[in-house]
Image (cartoon, grey):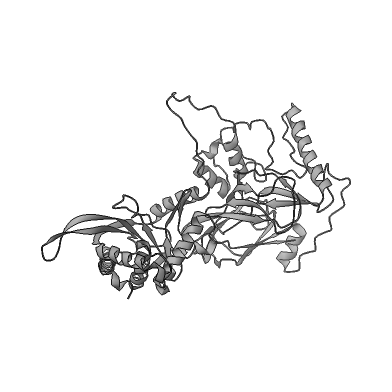
Amino acid sequence: MSVEIVMPRAGLTMVEGTIGTWKAAEGAHVNKGDTIMEYENEKNMIEYEALSSGTLHILAKEGDTVKVGALIAVLADDQAEYDAIVKGGAAPAPAAPAAPAAPAPAAAADGAVTEIEMPRAGLTMVEGTITRWIVPEGTEVVKGQAVMEYENEKNSIEYEIVHGGFLHIVAQEGETIQVGAPIAYVTDTKEQYEQLIASNGAAAAAHSSAEDGEAEKGCARNCPTCVHTSAAAPEAPPVTGRIRASGLAKKMAREAGIDLAAVAPSGGPNGMRIVAKDVKAYLDRPRAAAAVPSVEDEVTEIPWTGVRKTIARNMFNSMQQMAQSTCVCEVDATELLSLRAKLVEDKDVLGCKITVNDLLCKMLGKILPKHPYANATFDGKTLYTHKHVHLCVAVGAEDGLLVPVVKNIDQLSLREISERVRDLAARAKERKLQPDEQAGGTCTITNVGMFPIDIGTPVINPPQTAIFGFGRTVRKAVVMPDDSIVPRSMMNVFLTFDHQILDGLEVGRILKDTQYYIEHPEMILA
């Protein structure tokens, strides 16, 4: 049966893409994982890899701009189906599969074993890390039961199994698995499960005793993520000329800092194209021991994965794609702290304990609508301003900074803001935020007033155009308008902005409004 290929979405703001180059010709047979097309979104030129094998029929030509989700090509199962599609007729029905001459070793009846893949939680997710198996190996599970927790770039998510049966785990806790790769198998009966395990053990034993260096066969289902003892992969021969590699392989190599010329290829029709599994095999190969450190030294390797890896990539891209600049303004926060103290005294009446951060969030809900370029998103070509303020509130967690979004904060009361910020922050630290609670922000606030930090240069959260930072309050001797010198609580406000969008005049106006509200905090509540 033919498979439709649609324009993919590469980024939350992408609405259309332009076909750059078709890497495979019309009517060519392509394999799963082959790069068949390059397309361009608002920021990048991106390679597209076929998700299945077949004969390619191209519908969108090079240079065409196509909406996300619109059809751009079709992959036919065979030449007959391709001919039917090209002629405009119905594709022939797939032939019924022939019955096998004999059952495969340790294989159960048709449909008896179901493969469980690493799920995709979010459009940008390419891999996930298994944090915990909730049920042990061999457990009988039912459809809809939570069996595993995994981590993507933002959250820790429970996985509910889609098929009941006996669970055989092939990806262990702590492993990072590509989306779509097998993590487990489910058999219909206990006998089929035992048959699967027995076949796995027999394959491993046979491989360990083999002397001819043949590749192991793995489990009965040839699951690629099972852990077996295997010989070290041979070093790749030197590669000369043009190196052919998939987009994911290039990305993995770039992030790992390795030269693709050192990686042995195995993909493509002739086995000369480097694919993701080749890079992984290169990274997993036994390496020479590092130089022995001095007795006083202790070196710990920390894999940069999950949220930390995503933060690193996003912050690097943010600095590369924007003309970021930071301006700082010192303000008198004495009256703001006094107002907050009064609100804390009335916490029983209000029903919550108001923080300085709550007041600052409420203040930005008033300031940002007056400065739409700071309450905006920019994709490199178009600026999108927003009527309402969807404020990202930076929350520090042990495994990285998270930025849940308080939607329509300009429409909320101070009490509502306090309750929502507290709820989102608590669930962010527990990694229990929903995807829509971390998307759609139009500006960000980061408050480091609880630390001995006076000034910072926060990095903008793309595709936003600005981020507000607030430092600690410090008691200082201040010359008042009547020339008297009195102690006051002073605080620095630092605003990082994209100089492609905002200039000094507008930033000055924003900081002037910020200073006014902090020094006249009753207007925050007006």
User: How many numbered marks, from 0 up?
Assistant: 0
Q: Which is nearer the eye, 418 or 329? A: 418
Hey, which quadrant is residue 170 in on the image? top right
Quick check: 467 above or below 363?
A: above
Quick check: 253 above or below 235?
A: below
Taking 421 as reference, is 97 left or right?
A: right
Can you name the residue that lies furthest to the bottom here?
Answer: 526
Residue visible at 55% across and 68% down in the picture: 67
Q: Which is nearer the eye, 53 or 453? A: 453
Screen quadrant of the C terminus: bottom left
Hey, which quadrant is residue 7 in on the image? bottom right
Q: Could you tell me if residue 462 is visible in this image?
A: yes
The picture places residue 362, in percent across and down from the top left corner, at: 37, 68
Quick check: 388 above or below 203?
A: below
The picture places residue 490, in percent across and down from the top left corner, at: 24, 58
Q: Which is nearer the eye, 275 or 353? A: 353
The picture places residue 462, in percent across and down from the top left corner, at: 43, 59
The picture places residue 245, in percent across and down from the top left corner, at: 57, 45
Taking 299 as reference, is 74 left or right?
A: right
